[in-house]
Amino acid sequence: MSIEVNNETGHECDEHELVRISRYVMDELRVHPQAELSIVLVDEPAMERLHVQWMDLPGPTDVMSFPMDELRPGSEDAEPEPGLLGDVVLCPSVAAQQASQAGHTTQEELLLLTTHGILHLLGYDHAEPDEEAQMFELQRRLLLTFLAGKGRPRP
């Protein structure tokens, strides 16, 4: 898998951990091993421009996803297709505010948002209550198993 992180902000974050959680989520969802993902960290003005342009909503948001080849999770019955998964755009300053309110670290919020963004790239959504329940349960399970050590390299 090719996972590129481009931090266009002055915000310090563990980019290697963003790659690790991305790889973990993509492996767990059986995304083709040659799939490509880009993660971009932007400041609030840049995120606000994207939010207005693509969602017609004011102000910056925490995460946006831009799918490319409309890849879907693989299954045991069918081989996954290679291709460009797309871009996940994160806004660390918005993530920091949310993390403070939620009582965890900004890095943990960025891990959650990265997972959320990848799920959107794979076709998951939360517009309807049943979709939201499915997506958020999967997101919770993936994040918790990653943080429990399953997705982190052994020392």
Image (cartoon, rainbow, N blue to C red):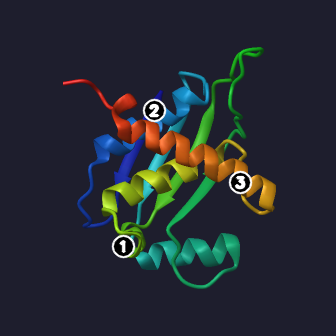
Q: Tell me the residue at 40%/76% (across/down).
A: 101
Q: Which residue is mark 3?
A: 133
What element does badge 1 sit on?
helix
> Image point 52% across, 40% down: which residue?
142
Q: Earlier in the sequence, mark 3 or mark 1?
A: 1
Residue 64 screen position, x and y as percent? 57, 61
The image shows residue 37, relative to residue 136, as above or below, that is: above
Which residue, given by chain and number where applicable, does mark 2 sit on? 23
List x then y, in percent, for residue 77: 77, 14
Q: Mark 1 and mark 3 in contact (Cβ < 8 Å)?
A: no
Q: Nearer the viewer, mark 3 or mark 2?
A: 3
Q: Amino acid at mark 3?
A: Ala
Separation of disc 3 and disc 2 at Cα? 23 Å
Q: CA distance from mark 2 to mark 1?
A: 24 Å
Residue under label 1: 93
SS of the residue at dot 3? Answer: helix
Amino acid bearing label 1: Ser
Disc 2 residue crowd, few under 14, some 14–19, many 20+, Cα 10 Å: some
Q: Quadrant of residue 126?
A: bottom right
Q: Classify mark 1: residues with Cα within 10 Å, few (<14), some (14-19) or many (20+).
A: some
Task: Classify residue 140 as left or right of residue 45.
Answer: right
